[in-house]
Each structure stands twice: as structure tokens, then as C-alpha cells.
Image (cartoon, rainbow, N blue to C red):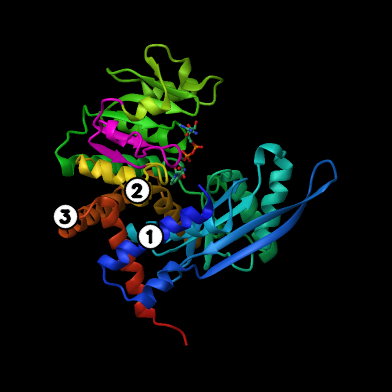
Amino acid sequence: MSGQRVLNMAREQLATAASILNIDEGLHQVLAHPVRQVIVNFPVVHDNGEVAVYEGYRVQHNLSRGPTKGGIRFHPDVDVEETTALSMWMTWKCAVVNIPYGGAKGAVKVNTKQLSRREIEKLARRYATSINMIIGERSDIPAPDIGTNAEVMGWIMDTLSMQHGYTVPGVVTGKPIELGGSEGRVEATGRGVVVSAIEACRATGIDFEGAKIAVQGFGNVGSVAARLSEQHGAKVVAVSDATGGIYNENGLPVNELYQKFSGVEGGIRNYKECDEISNEDLLEVKCEVLMPSAIQEQITEKNAKKIKAKLVVEGANGPTTPEADRILGDKGVMIVPDILANAGGVVTSYFEWVQDLQNFFWEEDQVNDRLAKIMQRSFASVHDMAVKHKVDMRTAAMLIAVQRVAEATTMRGIFP
Ligand code: NAD
């Protein structure tokens, strides 16, 4: 999807919410535009001595509810429009779970598969330096996204700390625990997905214990969601990764799959007591709960009619297209939208930031308990809103988020 299409989609979603909430046109326009878009071009000396110039972005969408927060993506297809749309979604995600942040996003147009580890480090450090005038522990706090990880966050933290002359752990989240990262951060998104699924089951009269679950994607989000679902007594009947999926109607031993086959050549397909299925088949298996936790645009107008799940809990960002949303809605399928279902990551990033600012670190149980409470409370408020306005959960989540951001923006007033 081109960046402009993604941005149009984000603006369309905002327009729908603004119209239901009766937000005046001036305020709607404020929310439809990012506060800052910085485009940087910076050189990196490659291992062979050649110099290459890279283009990067940092976009801050709305500052009304607090400093901005959002991941950094290293990917060849990024552009400033896509980064802007993603920053807007971060604003709504932080608002729907009511943590005191606005949304931001960063990106560098690069194929990291063509770079050595040393080149990626130099790229990350130089990009961080290029945007250092707008990021900071009190202003805008990056985190990992596609193509970046805890190691990259560690380099960025070190780079900014070198420039300050002292260690500033709160300038990024998703860091290694040794550098001020939080217990529970790695599992947080998958954990939040499972809490959302349990709440959605409760709201729709499905018993999560014994419920059949299908999970697309067996990476950070999907593998944790599958393993925690199993721990809560659900039966995970199908999982998949980029190479395809496996299915057993009696349940798969997901913990064992994770221990034995993650990162191994051939992945989960090495497991034999199951049927091999494609990623498309996985979406259509008989189950109560489907957790698309891989990539965007997986449930579309082509396959939505064939989906048998009663609940779709979006671990991935943007797995369901607007057309599929309508089809599933007509079939009575509840969709727990991405900005709610996968918000566990940013909630625990918020915990990490709070711990860094206080230099006081929590036990893993405290992190997980607080995360579960926030996810449960957020699910309840979105569900109440959906019932009150007779809208689907995605629209309800947007209504809550946009209302909170609009209120904060109005209360602060327009300077000067
Ligand atoms: P990951 O890279 O760890 O895992 C992605 C998984 O999807 C892998 O198992 C991969 O094999 C699989 N996959 C890749 N292409 C696929 C395809 N075409 N069909 C089926 N499976 C495919 O990534 P992740 O961190 O688990 O993120 C997954 C999704 O969750 C993304 O949409 C991401 O934006 C979203 N998300 C992640 C976090 C987080 O904290 N990691 C937070 C919020 C949202």
C-alpha cells in the first residue's frame, strides 16, 4: 500500500469519528495534520569505504496529552506519508488505553538485509543524531518497530547519552533490560492480545477455556499470544509463519513448538503431528478466536465471507481491510481492533519510561498485573461505547480516542 493511501485511510477513519462526535471543522483539521514532520538525509560510510545517503523521517502527530511516542521502522518502502499515518494511529492507540502520550513515528528508507551489523549501528546512530533536535525523554520517545529491535534502541540511547554527557535511559523504550528496559516488555503485546481475547469472549458468552484459537504469525506477538492462550486453557488449533501454517483440530503443543522450532530452518513446519496449511487457509479454519498477528491486509473482501471465527483479535497492525470489516460486521463477528488489542506493547513501554525516569524498577508480576488492568479497563470502556452508540468495536475505540485527544487539545487552547 502506498503511503498516501494509508494516510487517506487514517484521515477517513478520523473523519468518521469526528462526524459522529460532532467535532467542529477547525478542530478536525488540527487532528488531521501532524504537528511536526522532519525529513533528514544523512550519510553512512559502508564497510567497503563507500558513502551512501539515506532518507529518514520523524513525525509527531499530536502533543496535547503528553510527549509523543512511537516506533522507528527500517524498511525500503517507507515514506513520509506512511510515517504520518502511523504517527496518527499511535495518537489514537495511546489515547484509547489512556496513557499520557501523543503519537509519533520514525522511519529510514533502507533494506537492512543488505547491511552488516556495523553498518546498521552506524545508520541508527547517525539517524538518531539527525533527529535529536526533536526527540528526548520529555518530548518524543522512540521504540522498536519493523526492522529495529532492542539492540538498535540501545545504540540510540547510547548516542543521545553521549551527546548529553550523561546516561538518559528514558529517551527510548524497548531497550535491553540491562540498559534500563522493563521486565515483561518483550511479551507485552502478545499478553495484551490474550487479555483482550479473554475479555471479548466474556462479552460474547464464549468460554475461553477450551475455545479453539488460530494465530497467524509466530513472531514476537503471535508466538506469545499462542503460548499464553494455551496457558489459559484455550486450544490453539492453528499457527503459521511466513513459510505457511500447521493445523490440528485437537490442539497444537505451542510451547513445545516455540522451544524446538523457533529460529530453526523450516520453522514450525518441522512439526509432524498436524496437517500443513497455507496462511490463507489458516484464516478460514474452524475456531472461536482468530488472532491475525503477522502483517497488514490479511482479511479482505476476498476471504472475509469464509472466516468461521466468532471473534477476531488484531495482534498485527491493520490486518483487516475496511471492506472486510463491513462483511464480518454483517456476519456478527466481533473485531477487537488493533489500536486496542495490540496496545500492550506501548503500555509496557510507558511503564519502562516511568521506571527510567524514577530509576526504580518493578518486578515482572507488577508489570504484568498493571498491564492486564489497563487492558481490561480499556476493553470495557470501548465495549460500553460500542453498545451506547450501536457501532462496531473499531469505531467505538476511535470515538474514545478522538474524544480524549479533542478534549485535551481544546482545554489547552490555541497558542498564542
Ligand atoms: P515479528 O517479525 O516478530 O513476527 C512476524 C511473524 O509474521 C513471523 O512469524 C513471520 O514469519 C510472520 N509473517 C511474515 N510475513 C508473513 C506472511 N506474509 N504471512 C504470514 N505470516 C507472515 O513481528 P511482530 O513484532 O510479532 O509483529 C507482528 C505484527 O504485530 C506487526 O503487524 C506489528 O506491527 C504488530 N505489532 C507488534 C508489536 C510488538 O510489540 N512487537 C506491537 C504492536 C503491534
Mark 1, residue position: 12
Disc 3 or disc 1, which is closer to the eye? Answer: 1
Q: Distance between the residues labelled 1 and 2?
A: 11 Å
Estimate the x, y position of residue 78 in percent, counting from the top left: 58, 50
The residue lying furthest to the top in this view is 273
Mark 1 near ligand 1 (CB under 8 Å)? no
In the drawing, what numbered circle is on residue 71? none
Disc 2 or disc 3, which is closer to the eye? Answer: 2
Quarter-of-image position of residue 230: top left
Magenta residues span 285-314
Mark sitting earlier along the chain (2/3): 2
Mark 2, residue position: 322
Query: Looking at the image, can residue 63 be seen?
Result: yes
Whether tag 1 and tag 2 are in contact, CB under 8 A, the answer is yes
Q: Is mark 1 on a helix, strand or loop?
A: helix
Residue in the picture at 21% in, 52% down: 383
Mark 3, residue position: 387
